Image (spheres, rainbow, N blue to C red):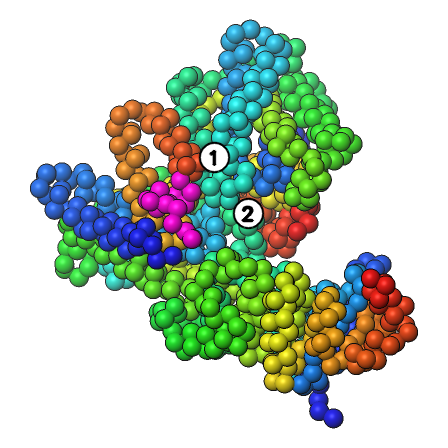
Amino acid sequence: MSTTLLAVQTLNGMQLGILLFLIAAGLTLVFGVMDFINLAHGVQYMLGAYLAVAAYKLTGSFWLALPLALLAALACGLLLEFLVFRHLYDRDHLDQVLATFGVILFLNEAVKVIWGAAPLSVPVPELLNGSIRLFENFNYPVYRVALLGTGLGVAALLYVLVTRTRVGMLVRAGASNAPMVAALGVNIRRLFMIVFGFGAMLAGFAGIMAAPILSVEPGMGDNLLILAFVVIVIGGIGSIRGAFLSALLIGLVDTLGRSFATDIARMLLPPSAANDVGPAIASMLIYILMAGVLFFRPSGLFPVRTA
Amino acid sequence: MTAPALQLKNLNKAYGALQVTKDLSLEVFPGEIHAVIGPNGAGKTTLIGQIAGNVQSDSGKVFFAGRDVTALPVARRAQLGLGRSFQITAILPEFSVLENVALGVQAHHGHSFHFFKPAATDESLNSKARAILDTVNLSHRTDARAGNLSHGEKRVLELAIALAGEPKLLLLDEPMAGTGPEETRNLVEVLKSLKASIPMLLVEHDMDAVFQLADRISVLVYGGIVATGTPDEIRNDAKVREAYLGEDETA
Amino acid sequence: MTGTAFLFRNRIVPILLFALLALVPAYAAFTDDRFILLFVTRILVLAIAAVSLDFILGIGAMVSFGHAAYLGLGAYAVGILADSDIWAAWISFPVAILISGLFALVTGAISLRTRGVYFIMITLAFGQMAYFTATSLSAYGGDDGLTLWSRSEFFDTGLFSDDTSFYYLVFGVLLAVTLLLKQIAGSRFGRVLKGAKQSEARLHAIGIDPYRYRLAAYVIAGMIAGLAGALMANQSEFVSPAYMSWQRSGEILVMVILGGLGSLHGAILGAVAYLSMEEVLSGYTEHWRLIFGPLLILVVLYGKGGLLGLIKGGDKS
């Protein structure tokens, strides 16, 4: 295992972590503040990617498509909130699971009907094409670097929003004790809508950013949804900081595990067995990690909920 | 002198810098109701937790039924005969009143790894549960869904569930909280009739009830006991009047 | 609570349901429709798993998101033994049940330390571990799975090989499992589970630590789902990691919630409804999920308590 490979995979892992964070941030807030399990959060990421494709086809420019798709993702999120989710806030978790599962089925199929089942993509914008030399013998695509930077920027912005603004304060208060916030006369419905719309937009943003480097296809949000749940559970539900750290952790563990597990297994096992065991262990790593974290910290690394 | 049913020795508990139980010792003897009173924030809830086992003491010992139970979990203490009512009602709302009490009886019968015999028609559970509901004057609600009871009835049901375990001591956390005058009278009568057989530690805000029921009263202020005595002694204790009753008498 | 609607939901519906299911082979023979027999067999196998999930979910409030793992364990037990030329059901079925029970014991002991959504996720984690382990079994097909050349054998009876008798076997297992779990739900053990769901603090205060009871229930449910898995391997004559995917776990969960929690037969209703709707709708259009998705949402929004709740609801006094 060479250092170059290690460096590339570390960057790739961080990139997955950033995407996961953008999805998990909304998920953990919606869950933490509204106590709402939204399985449909993953399809909002997918929707973002498809909207980027559509907006790119319309405008021919990534830079025009980006804000357009972002607004459309926000609109879709708010529409879903209005049509379905707001009727589920005071239902129990299982009702929410069933209904949002219905939303997944519908939207996965809807994109198939509208855009077809074949994978689509958006070309990398001209400005960010090519690669840069990070150090000797080591080039890395500009777009991926930009993605990393943007993600970190959004994370920082989000951190400031949540810790420094009034809405952020309400959101944090809501995550630790929602009934209290409602009792203080805050319009909780509107707070919910803001959090929800914002979460949907972040997930959509992740989808848009992913569109030029990953294939855009129906169901692309499903596996990421599960990963995002792993992230928020490890991080502690409702905690932005926890979501950020555990998203990076999961991104790195998963990516590095996949590239090196087989090599490591070869040191311990005969090659043929290692070839079988390696990939399986690699896929399992994050789940082993989650089970381990929950065994020692049953409420995640950064528990928020007081009650 | 008979051995105490419950003995607390030098209990301490702090949350960070806040000392909520300070070197606290007290006894409950067979046949008596020992009331603990004190202003809000005196540490009564924590004390209840330390006795019941939800709160781990920093130091000190809890002796119950002749043995050191300081390290035992809640369920083990309950099995030894520590019955309790909760400050915030903890009944099983979806069960009928009878089922609530019958589950208490069942818990007292030993383990519940009985998979086949229907519990609902098990007379060995139900007959005793009915008798207890009779004792606490709740038999007219036997088949009601517990969640549909009035607040006062729920408090009585709590007591009935605790009694189902044939407790050697009752730990009562504000049993009168939120009950109407009629219901309070009923509870006072029921507790009076029980105290000969079951000693009780009573934490209560309703002073009338406390002075009617208690044989001895301890006054808790800032986690420590400032006075213990008969109701008359406590009524006339200068320290207590200052710390606690002072406001009450002007009211 | 003993209104006519209650009686209808809890007595007449299950009797009708089983009566109708008992008639399926006759109907299939009459219309000469072999497909319906095989299709309903598949429904019933999944219904067994759904009933076992409802036992821990509806009665014990344990939301397991890894229940498909047991289907897979049971199926692989049959598949791997068959691969070593052991076809006898009296060996493979007990092995399937035991292995599933053991897996439930170990993972349950760890999972039950957590609550709520953390429990959901940790059961998912163990399910995923089982799934990826199966994909690494290259000797048994890895990702692609393992084809069985024939069904299990029960002495020389043809119990498994004949489609109709296999149907009745599965039907019998489903009936027996439902009755058994209903009996347990009404026992002292079941009462503890139901009580712990309502107030854990109260249970502790009367001297019951619910942990061991929950774990026992979790193991029982795991063993039954393992049995369903062993039947599933026979039904499809094929074993693959897909049996254990989280999507499959989610599907069983949805069946149970769709049917209505806690009654056990509601889970059967949910399995029948879910799989037949899928079958019927996909007959009309390849994009059947466009209809099915909103249907699920409507059931949640307008029918509290799942399909059973739709049956003359609103009698809860």
> Magenta residues?
C303-317
The residue that disc 2 covers is C117
For disc 1, the chain is A
Q: Position of residue A118 (x, y in %)?
A: 41, 20
**Is label 1 in a helix, a strand or a loop?**
helix
Q: Nearer the viewer, mark 2 or mark 1?
A: 1
User: Does residue B56 lie above or below A230 as drawn?
Assistant: below
User: Does residue A112 lie above or below C91 as drawn?
Assistant: above
**Viewer-nearest residue: A30 or B136:** B136
Q: Which residue is pictured at 51% across the width and 34% down the height?
A: A87
**Is label 2 in a helix, a strand or a loop?**
helix
Q: Position of residue B100 (x, y in %)?
A: 49, 66
The residue that disc 1 covers is A100
- Amino acid identity at mark 1: Thr
Is A94 contained in the magenta span? Answer: no
Is C308 contained in the magenta span? Answer: yes
Residue C165 falls left or right of residue C77:
left
- Amino acid identity at mark 2: Val
Q: Which residue is pictured at 69% across the width and 26% down the height?
A: A154
For disc 2, the chain is C
Q: Which residue is pictured at 54% across the width and 28% down the height?
A: A81
